[in-house]
Amino acid sequence: MQKKFYITTPIYYVNDKPHIGHAYATLLADVLARWHKMKGENTWFLAGTDEHGAKIAEAAQKHNQAPQEFTDEISALFRETWKNLNIVSSDFIRTTENRHKVSVSAFMSALKDKGYIYEGTYEGLYCTSCERFYTEKELTPEGQCPDHKRKPETIREKNYFFKLKSFLPEIIKDIEEGRMKIYPKKRYNEVLSMLEQELTDISVSREHVKWGIPLPFDTNQTIYVWVEALQNYISALGYDPDEKKQDKKFTAYWPADIQIIGKDIAKFHCIFWPALLKAMDLPVPKKFIITGFFTVDGQKMSKTIGNVIDPNVLLKDFGVDGTRYLILSQFPVGEDGDIKASGFHVKYNADLADTLGNLCSRVANMIHLYSGGKVSVENMSAGKWEEKYEQAMNNDNVFEALAEIFSKARELNREINEVKPWEKAKRDKESVIPFLQNWAARIAGLGYELQPFLPTAGRTIHEQFQSGAPQKKLILFPKITVK
Ligand code: MSP
């Protein structure tokens, strides 16, 4: 039977336009989805936007817009940006869509019917920017939210609670026994240590937040935005708690094979989410890949500092594949890292123009000079994956896999410099042909491997060299003059 592969990204808040951190996580999912598709798996890739809650309502108000109008605009911007980056998701879910509201309402009613919801009063310190409560201990010495440096509000209201605590021992077992994998190891340890702390049941509704999905059994309340947002991963598959109404898509794809999330949202995904799923007798995700945080020139990206990198601006300078490369080649998956915005041109020129681009154009050119524009690459190994690359990809180490391709490209360039075919050709043109055949085949192989990362350039390189007759002037990545 054909293997299935379901991968998701976090759904992004639509309070502001997408930045390079969002693009990174989504590109990572795109690369893995493309890879699994190439392996012949039945792949489903979900992306989307998170549109309810006080934070979004606040942002809409600041722009003097109604929340729906505001979220329509920003959500479209995310979708557009992914399209510009040649990110091809199978579906894009917005939490303001009816299909999401219907699925979530049914989920919440079923949760209540199963006895996992109870009424209580909540008093706590709430940070609207995070859309979460904090304990005093978690705040900075000045009493502020550590992420947003803003003083949380004290909120006291009637809420409904979910019996989270009953599911914690099972979740610990699932993690420890590898049924729900968490990468990298550092984050695995962090999640387990969060689970060892005294966790309380979570509130699943808000009395004073109006911009949200009404709680089906008490419409004076809306569903807590996180509880609702997490469900996008199944609402998009048409999940219905009533077996008889279950969507085929849900049966085909759930549980997710990989959920990509950021380190700041690990608690919601690795603890709250599996608990909600367990309460509904649903399987938990097979694996979480937890990405780190990008800083830019040593600082957190922020509008006030003015260091937010907009992927659409990079696209203008470096093109689609160039931008994909620059974002994906920054750091190993899961690491934090600092991006030097001024280094993009240097990296583009060194890796794409001078290494990969130059390799392709010089070999194409030599095929025309010494072999009449064609060599035979039949029976060569092109189109097969190198073991190291394949292993890295199968371990979701897209950074290593990409680096491996470029190290092979550098190796080939060195080999050409050593062989000096231009000198050989002066004596005997024919003697160069076997070298050209071998190089063309190897470049075709690299093109093949590049496809999940640089879909257009990868395909072009593969096709041009696999045919043995690349075009004479093959300029894939024109050099950029550093401004
Ligand atoms: N809406 C929630 C997620 C709900 S998922 C059911 C949310 N949205 S977010 O837009 O604030 O962040 C989405 C993702 O972007 C998170 O995984 C977060 O880690 C990631 N990033 C936000 N800033 C980032 C960087 N500076 N660098 C890398 N990724 C970062 O949280």
Image (cartoon, grey):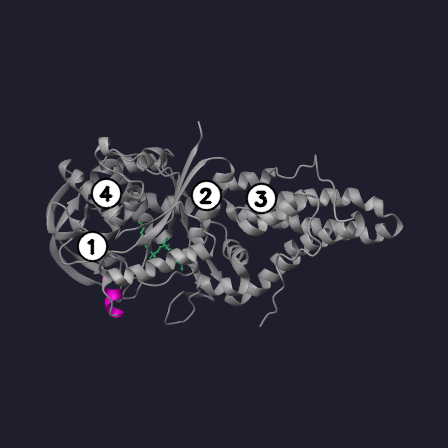
Separation of marks 1 and 2 at Cα, in angstroms:
31 Å
Separation of marks 3 and 2 at Cα, in angstroms:
14 Å
Residue designated by label 4: 103
User: What amino acid does circle 3 point to?
Assistant: Glu
Task: For residue 293, say whether it is visible.
Answer: no
Relative horizontal placement of residue 424, taking residue 210 as reference (left or right): right
- Mark closer to the chain start, 1 or 4: 4
The magenta segment: 55-63
Nearest the camera: 370 or 303? 370
- Mark closer to the chain start, 4 or 2: 2
Which residue is rendered at x = 22% and y = 47% of the image? Answer: 101
- Mark closer to the chain start, 1 or 2: 2
Separation of marks 3 and 4 at Cα, in angstroms:
39 Å
Residue 39 — which label? none
Q: Which secondary structure, mark 3?
A: helix
Residue designated by label 3: 449
Residue designated by label 1: 212
User: What amino acid does circle 2 point to?
Assistant: Ala
Q: Which secondary structure, mark 4?
A: helix
Q: Quadrant of ligand 1?
A: bottom left
Nearest the camera: 171 or 403? 403
Relative horizontal placement of residue 163, taking residue 395 as reference (left or right): left
